[in-house]
Amino acid sequence: STPLYSSAASDVYKRQGYSLGNLTAGTDNVYTENYESVSDVDFGLTFEFKLTELISMQTEINYTRRGGKRSGLQPANVSELSDQLNMFFPFIGLPPITNENPLYATFESESDLQYLEFPALVKFGWGDDFRFSAAIGPYVGILLKANQLTSGNSQFYLDSEGTTPVFVPGPNGQPVTLPSQSLDAETNIKDDIRVVNFGGILALGISKKLNESSNIFIDTRASYGFNACLLYTSDAADE
């Protein structure tokens, strides 16, 4: 963190850091399994209000990016193709394509979630020239943007093992395997993501006094979201 303003009663810092995400699936939802978290740069402003020599209140405004990547065979949300197949499948005794019974394909998928976060922390500090600190408190995150990026070409399958390819009526009326299709797309998924997130933060830091009116501060922190970011539809479980 870099100081922008400092006084005996308060400090304002410009902060920038590197976020190591850990996106996990808390349910058996097939759309959120096997995602690897992505990391990115966060930045924002920190406002520290000194209550005593030991205790201060610290509020922040931070821009942060979250998300995950998934590669290989996975559920494919292709509504147009699903609608077409659902006109054909009942006549041959196959169940319809739904969120609980999706199509599968092999492709690359990445979710990009961008938030504005507002932590409110109680900070404890000790020392003078070198000052050590620990802070704890909640945060509120407001979703700004949510996109899903997919890429690749693949056949479609009816099962998660990729053993039963999708087939469609051929020119002579006999079923033929559906050829590979492009899955290159960028989709706005903001309606599927919870707009407001709540969580907690634990931070440890050290600062070095530069002169009587300013110092430089470095901290490391862990944050944990209390609620699931995904809003599930009516035919999927809600957490």
Image: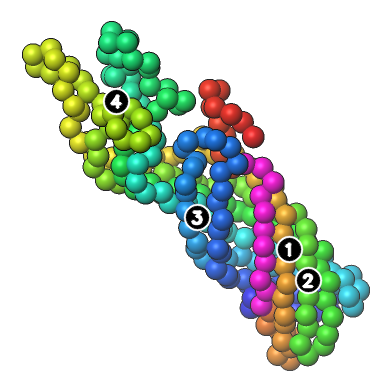
The quadrant the C terminus occupies is top right
The residue beneath circle 2 is 134
Which residue is at a point 55% across and 68% down the rendered structure image? Answer: 18
Q: What's the distance in space between the residues labelled 2 and 3, CA to CA?
A: 26 Å
The residue beneath circle 3 is 37
Q: Main secondary structure of the magenta part?
A: strand
Q: What's the distance in space between the residues labelled 4 and 3, CA to CA?
A: 29 Å
N-terminal of the pair, mark 1 or mark 4, is 4
Colour scheme of the rendered structure: rainbow
N-terminal of the pair, mark 2 or mark 3, is 3
In the rendered structure, which amino acid carries the disc numbered 3?
Ser
The residue beneath circle 4 is 81
Label 2 element class: strand
Asked if the residue at tag 3 contacts the one at tag 2, i.e. Cβ–Cβ closer than 8 Å, the answer is: no
In the rendered structure, which amino acid carries the disc numbered 1?
Leu
Question: In the image shown, does 160 or 47 lie closer to the viewer?
Answer: 160
Q: Which residues are magenta?
A: 218-228
Q: What's the distance in space between the residues labelled 1 and 4, CA to CA?
A: 46 Å
Spot occupied by residue 102 in the image (x, y as percentages of width and height) = 40, 28
Q: Is residue 148 visible?
A: yes
N-terminal of the pair, mark 2 or mark 4, is 4
